[in-house]
Amino acid sequence: MGAGRLYGAVAVGGFRRYATYRAATAAGVFTNTVFGLILVYTYRALWDERPHLGGYDQAQALTYVWIGQALLATLSIGGGGVEVELTERIRTGDVAVDLYRPADLQLWWLAADLGRAMFQLLGRGVVPFVVGALCFPLYLPRDAGTWLAFLGAVLLAMLVGFGLRYLVALTAFWLLDGTGVAQITWLVGFFCSGMLLPLNVFPGTLGEVVRLLPWSSLLQLPADVLLGHADPLGTYAFQAAWAVVLLGAGRLIQAAATRRVVVQGG
Amino acid sequence: MAAGGHGERSAPGEHAGGGERAGSGEWAGGGERAGSGEWAGTGRIAAGLRTYGLIAAMWTRSTMAYRASFALSTLTSFAATFFDFVAIMLMFSRVRALGGYALPEVAFLYGLSAVSFGLADLAIGSMERLGRRVRDGTLDTLLVRPAPVLAQVAADRFSPRRIGRVLQGALVLGWALARLDVVWTAPKLLLMPVTVLSGFGIFCSVFVAGAAFQFVTQDASEVQNAFTYGGTTLLQYPPTVFGKELVRGVTFLLPLAFVNWLPACYVLGRPYPLDLPGWTAFASPLVAVACCALSGLAWRAGLHSYRSTGS
């Protein structure tokens, strides 16, 4: 009970912290909308050439674009979640303060990241999607159930996304400078989540392999739930399995890391 | 000599000692203007380039102290842009043409856009950090130095690893040139280097204008990405793909079309977007000069409006 309130407060803090920077949020909305526009036109050309490519019709493909823009910041697919700060705290040794707190390191940062993700979804995700829906013929399900199922998949995607980024941050315990690892995972994530191109458009074996990787939980699977292309329960099971594996690995590595932590400085 | 005069005017003691607000107004606004009066136009540009060269060389030396890290981050920068092209290749594994353009033609557009943008990003891409300097007050350090502020900001944190993007673009461009079915005439050959240079100029002016905008809205630096990264992404695809309004916008409002679309249409013998006349393919250098002049004005206005954080 007490612990629940603590992590709840941390999550609210994460939400409010990001909500403070209104100009930055507006700028992000603008940029997401512009990128969405560019992608929409290229996808339209692609689906004009090959209708029903990857099983999507054109309206579904265009909807996919705006789901991607809505989830880009929410799930920190391009980096920029709490892991940036955690890496820096590990490098500077401030993480010692975090370890000293009567709270679990992983849960603390998970709560902060969920708060951030919730704000990014409302503050940065909704507007580009609405702009897209007003300007282009999108595929929008009529029943509330599909939208709720989609939100469920997005929530699980937040857990998977954090699980991945927490592992990246923990490498700083060994490497001190986490930029290289962060950049590489950012690249892989961008490509394997379906941010550059929906995974069902990928040819042959490559397409099948990327669908099994954890990154497919971030964008491809929630989008498929909204577009009526995937069964929500099967999707949840896949996402939950990856969340358990990644968060579990995070706990193990965290235990190993904190045993060897030597705080630099006086 | 000229630099010395500038330094005197903005000696650290002057603004640190006197009334904060009044002092900052004096050296950010008045000092600049008086300085520009003393300097002949060319002398000023020479001083700026010299400053830029010195600072960039300093950052390069500091980067080269960690050669392995430099090699790795250059490779990452190469790979980051490479994935962009992989996405286009994946698209072409499913279709034969996009907006009527075949893969070598799209690669040609991609290469021109990536090389021009990569060069601009390499040269002055760090300017996007200006908002941070305005917010935390470290811009003041640059203002008290006896050197042009624009050159200092442009060379700030110069990162040679950004050559990775240029190399990747050049590789794609080379591949496209080898695969294209084009009869190369003298004007077409001549147009190639002119296009890359003009594109470099246009993207540089976008970076400078973006930085000037950050004087006004420090937190909103991400807006710039829509025009820089967004611009180069847009230009990687044929103009036939996009809606008329969007093409009009990037031709007449923000003339990105002159970076590669119009020259490429001439080289590939394609119809010009918006039925523009044929000479527009050769107008890129003029457009680049005009853009640089306008963004220079925007930069001056931005710098003159700057008031320090005050504490």
Image (cartoon, grey):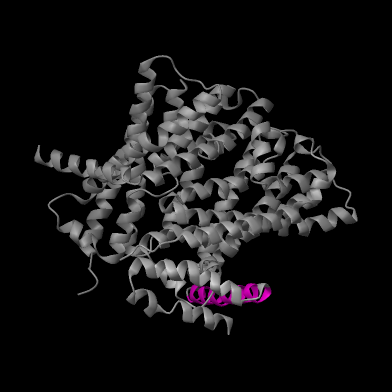
Quick one: which residue is furthest to the bottom in this view?
B1
Question: Residue at (46%, 45%) from the top-left corner?
Answer: A189
Rendered location of residue A137, percent (x, y): 55, 21
Taking the image as shown, residue A101 lies to the left or right of residue B119, namely left
Res A171 → quadrant: bottom left
Question: Residue at (46%, 26%) from the top-left corner?
Answer: A224
Rendered location of residue A237, percent (x, y): 34, 29
Question: Residue at (45%, 47%) from the top-left corner?
Answer: A78
Residue B186 seen from this side: yes
Q: Up-down: is A246 above or below B214?
A: above
Res B103 → quadrant: top right
Question: Residue at (18%, 49%) from the top-left corner?
Answer: A104
Rendered location of residue A161, percent (x, y): 36, 42
Res A8 → quadrant: top left
Taking the image as shown, residue A256 lies to the left or right of residue A34, namely left
Along the line of sight, the residue nearer the viewer: B16 or B34 = B34
Residue B45 lies within the magenta run: yes
Rendered location of residue B252, percent (x, y): 68, 42
Taking the image as shown, residue A67 lies to the left or right of residue B13, namely right
| Highlighted range, magenta | B42-65
